[in-house]
Image (spheres, rainbow, N blue to C red):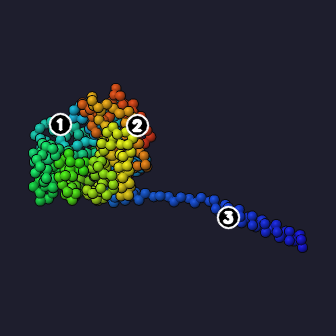
Amino acid sequence: MKKALHFFSLVLLVIVLSCKTDETEEAIVTPTPPVITDVVTPQNVKTFMVDKNATTETAALFYNLRNSGKTKIIIGQQDAFNSFYETSGFSDIKKSTGNDPAILGSDFMFITDKENPSNNWFVQQENKIIQDTKDAYNKGIINTFCWHLREPYNENSFYASDMTDSQKSDAFKSLLPGGKFNDWYKKKLDKVASIVSNLKDNNGKLIPIIFRPFHEFDGNWFWWGANYCTAEEYISVYRFTVNYLRDTKNVHNILYAFSPDNSYTTSSSYLSRYPGDDYVDILGMDNYEDFDNKGTSGASLANSKLKLISDLAISKNKIAALTETGYRVTSTTPAINNWFSTYLYDAITNNNLQIAYVMFWNNTSTGYYVPTPGNSNVADFQNFTLKSKIILQNNISKMYSFP
């Protein structure tokens, strides 16, 4: 009987230990994390875009910019191949790094000027811009256009300071249907539409561009500034611009960028003049002030503002970008040590930002934003471009076709 009890006890002990082992093993099993699938796919990407009839290459640009921005930052410069003051045909970024920028910034300003086509200089600038755009596309570079549109009264300036108070009070809202400058504005848009609709590669395919109309509207230096129109008027003109190009002129190779200056610190204020998701592909911000010799505090402030638009873009399945920036070095304004590799880089990368691209403004004969060899901060710029997150033309992926 004792042997039987002893045997039974051993069997019971084995069972109990076996159960405990199973429970222990079960407790430490790590569940497989769920696979997070992006809602934006090559098949449905156009549903998230302004233009549901966008060309395949334009849709691919939206898709690839958005995906690239999750881990990389593409670097560009305005008038990289032609500053209108110095023409070398060789970008300053390439002079310093051996590689061209991955984004070329251009302007419709001279193309739509009242002197074009009567003044041959403006025609020359138009032809140069068109050729640069085509050459950039052939290199895989992205093209973006701003528009320093001259005011409609005299067409002499885009600065509000050059206008009378009465002109400033009604110029912008008069661009709308029923306004005295609506026909004038439509003729300007006709020229833009003609240029963009004829930007074609060697195979006859339309070249996509990014267009950011009426930028830095929260300031008051341009005649479309916040003091000269209501939020409703700004939104209406922006929407009219998109509708006219897309629906009336059937232009389908544009991504539209919303591009205020850096005054916003909350999502609600940033969106106060936002035309809506149906009219915006890229949520941008121009920011020079926070980088104007303000060290780490300025970089931190810039980062917080970029975090704001990055989060908004993620929530809206859009693209975020630093659409203009830079620190201008002149004969009287010296370079700042580590401006590129520390202050700017921290601002565009800290806090898990998803900023697709950064655009520097143009270099001129009197000052530069991007240093060339021989300048004191060229090594700092080179170090910046060598960081793993930074993309120049040599390592940009194919942006105009789906993966």
Q: Residue at x 40, y 37 (%)?
A: 341
Q: At which x and y percent is residue 330?
A: 27, 31
Is 363 displayed left or right of 315 in the figure?
left
Q: CA distance from mark 1 to mark 3?
A: 80 Å
Q: Nearer the viewer, residue 54 or 361?
A: 361
Is 96 displayed left or right of 193 in the figure?
right
* Quadrant assignment, res 270: bottom left
Q: Residue at x 31, y 31 (%)?
A: 334
- Residue corresponding to mark 2: 341
Q: At which x and y percent is residue 18?
A: 73, 64
Q: Is residue 24 above or below residue 303?
A: below
Q: At which x and y percent is residue 167?
A: 11, 50
* Earlier residue among tags 1 and 2: 1
* Quadrant assignment, res 312: bottom left
What amino acid does circle 1 point to? Answer: Gln
Q: Residue at x 44, y 40 (%)?
A: 388
Image quadrant where one finds the N terminus: bottom right
- Residue corresponding to mark 3: 23
User: CB atoms at circles 1 and 3 under 8 Å apart?
Assistant: no
Q: Is residue 90 above or below residue 41?
A: above
- The circle drawn on residue 124 is 1
